[in-house]
Image (cartoon, rainbow, N blue to C red):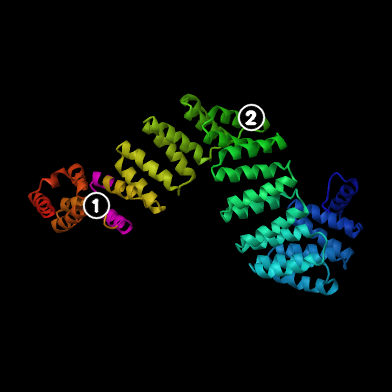
């Protein structure tokens, strides 16, 4: 039983124990008192005091199995698994029908990533106890570690059958459904559960999220409304209902729901951000940007807040401010390819081409291999005279997009620019064969090249051959 400060007897035991530690006077406690004291310290994270209580407890009650199991728990916590196993073996010989011995053995297996063995031990423990819910939960977690989501789901469902208010298991069941992309099956399960438990706000909330994932917004809306009816203080339901109202274009109603959550608790950055987006959709730009600023004031480390301000000023073509705020977002999440691409585009509009090149390079390094990114980087490298760099960039792009006319015409212009006419001719002919309409690239990016007699001759030969 967990130690409770509301229980005067147990509180008295704790006070006596701490007084004993201060005075070095040895006082006697029965084994149950020691168990409660140890529980208290473990739950409070005071491991050193828990170890002292275990040591003194075993000195006074050397044969107490529960106190020795606490010692096992400490060994496991400290990763002293060999010592824990030796002690468990000793305890098994004393009390082979103690389910806690099996649970700790399974815990050790789990720590060693031997999850199948852990499950086997926990299944044996099921035969030794009437309190099966905790064991079902532990087995479900082991299956999760093995990525065996169907089996995990089965055991969490067993938990919920024993205790219909075990919301942790309910969340785990839905997690399994989500991982398996079984939204329809999740809806069926939740509807059956709600038939038996019609006022379970958590189930209604999860049902709404499943409908939302399937874009069935009207059904999602109804589900969140039922969650609110079941618990009118359920902030998550108001937030999710707000998201649905946004999807339905009902921005004023969404604002009302997001705002109401702030009457239930302190404003959240999520609610402030969504209110800002709703105002922007309604054309209330001044209110929108006010809420974006409130968002980052509430949570300065929320990159989505800074990116919303960036997008706001970017649309207003206030690129200097947009650049300032995109840097804020990048400082929080420096590996976000979307942020680096936006950073590059803003710098490009400001004609800061070296910074733009750096931004596109970062976006590529972090996995944004869109053709547009490769081409944009090549174009800014061309602007700053980094012709070799632009060529290398386009050759890399060609590995992802072989036989691409936009790449070929750019390579042609670049090779002619550095006086490597043979390569220029080769890529020009490739580009014409792939799609001659993209010759406009030479006209716009390499106007001097397109007027070269040798280039004009290649065009003439191509058109003659085509006709």
The percent position of residue 78, horizontal first and vertical second, equals 69, 63
Q: Is residue 158 magenta?
A: no
Left or right of residue 35: residue 308: left
Report the magenta stretch's main SS: helix
Residue 253: percent from left, percent from top: 58, 28
Q: Is residue 44 above or below residue 199?
A: below
Q: Which residues are magenta?
A: 380-401
Around disc 1, counting alpha carbons within 10 Å, would you say few (fewer than 14), some (14 to 19), or many (20 or more)?
many
| Quadrant position of residue 153 | bottom right
Determine the residue positioned at 13% across, 46% down: 450
Picture quarter with the N terminus: bottom right
* Number of the label disc, if any, that sits on residue 260: 2
Mark with earlier residue (2, 1): 2
Q: Is residue 6 left or right of residue 175?
A: right
Q: Which mark is residue 452?
A: none
Q: Nearer the viewer, residue 125 or 3?
A: 125
Which is more toward the observer, 260 or 380?
260
Q: In this view of the protein, which residue sits in the foreground, 404 or 348?
A: 404
Q: Secondary structure at mark 2?
A: helix
Residue 289 coordinates in the image, percent (x, y): 48, 29
Query: Residue 304 appears at what percent x and percent y?
Result: 50, 40
Q: From where the camera sits, is residue 231 visible?
A: no
What residue did someone put label 1 on? 405
Q: At x 76% / y 58%, what residue is drawn?
A: 134
SS class, disc 1: helix
């Amino acid at each position: 039983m967990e130690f409770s400060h509301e229980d005067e007897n147990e509180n008295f035991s704790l006070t006596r124990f701490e007084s004993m530690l201060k005075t070095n006077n040895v006082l006697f406690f029965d084994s149950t008192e020691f168990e409660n004291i140890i529980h208290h310290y473990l739950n409070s994270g005071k491991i050193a005091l828990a170890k002292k209580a275990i040591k003194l407890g075993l000195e006074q009650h050397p044969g107490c199995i529960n106190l020795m199991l606490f010692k096992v728990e400490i060994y496991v916590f400290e990763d002293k698994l060999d010592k824990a196993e030796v002690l468990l073996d000793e305890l098994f010989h004393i009390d082979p029908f103690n389910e806690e011995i099996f649970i700790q053995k399974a815990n050790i297996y789990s720590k060693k990533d031997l999850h199948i063995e852990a499950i086997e031990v926990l299944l044996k423990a099921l035969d030794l106890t009437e309190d099966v819910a905790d064991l079902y939960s532990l087995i479900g977690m082991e299956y999760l570690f093995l990525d065996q989501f169907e089996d995990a789901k089965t055991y969490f469902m067993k938990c919920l059958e024993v205790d219909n208010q075990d919301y942790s298991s309910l969340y785990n069941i839905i997690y399994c459904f989500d991982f398996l992309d079984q939204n329809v099956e999740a809806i069926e399960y939740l509807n059956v559960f709600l038939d038996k438990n019609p006022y379970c706000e958590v189930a209604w909330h999860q049902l709404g999220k499943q409908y939302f994932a399937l874009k069935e917004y009207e059904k999602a809306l109804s589900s969140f409304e039922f969650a609110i009816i079941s618990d009118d203080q359920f902030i998550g339901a108001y937030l999710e209902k707000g998201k649905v109202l946004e999807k339905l274009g009902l921005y004023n109603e969404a604002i009302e729901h997001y705002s109401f959550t702030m009457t239930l608790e302190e404003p959240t950055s999520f609610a402030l951000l969504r209110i800002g987006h709703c105002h922007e959709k309604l054309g209330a730009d001044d209110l929108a940007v006010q809420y974006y600023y409130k968002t980052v004031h509430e949570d300065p480390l929320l990159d989505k807040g800074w990116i919303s301000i960036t997008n706001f000023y970017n649309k207003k073509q206030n690129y200097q401010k947009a650049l300032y705020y995109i840097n804020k977002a990048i400082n929080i999440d420096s590996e976000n390819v979307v942020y680096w691409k936006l950073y590059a585009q803003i710098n490009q509009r400001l004609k800061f081409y070296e910074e733009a090149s750096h931004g596109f390079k970062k976006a590529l390094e972090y996995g944004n291999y869109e053709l547009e990114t490769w081409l944009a980087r090549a174009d800014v490298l061309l602007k700053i005279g980094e012709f070799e760099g632009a060529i290398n960039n386009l050759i890399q792009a060609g590995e992802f997009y072989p036989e691409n006319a936009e790449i070929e015409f750019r390579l042609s212009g670049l090779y002619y620019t550095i006086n490597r006419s043979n390569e220029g001719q080769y890529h020009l002919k490739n580009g014409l064969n792939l799609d001659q309409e993209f010759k406009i690239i030479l006209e716009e990016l390499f106007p001097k090249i397109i007027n070269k007699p040798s280039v004009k001759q290649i065009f003439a030969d191509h058109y003659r051959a085509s006709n």
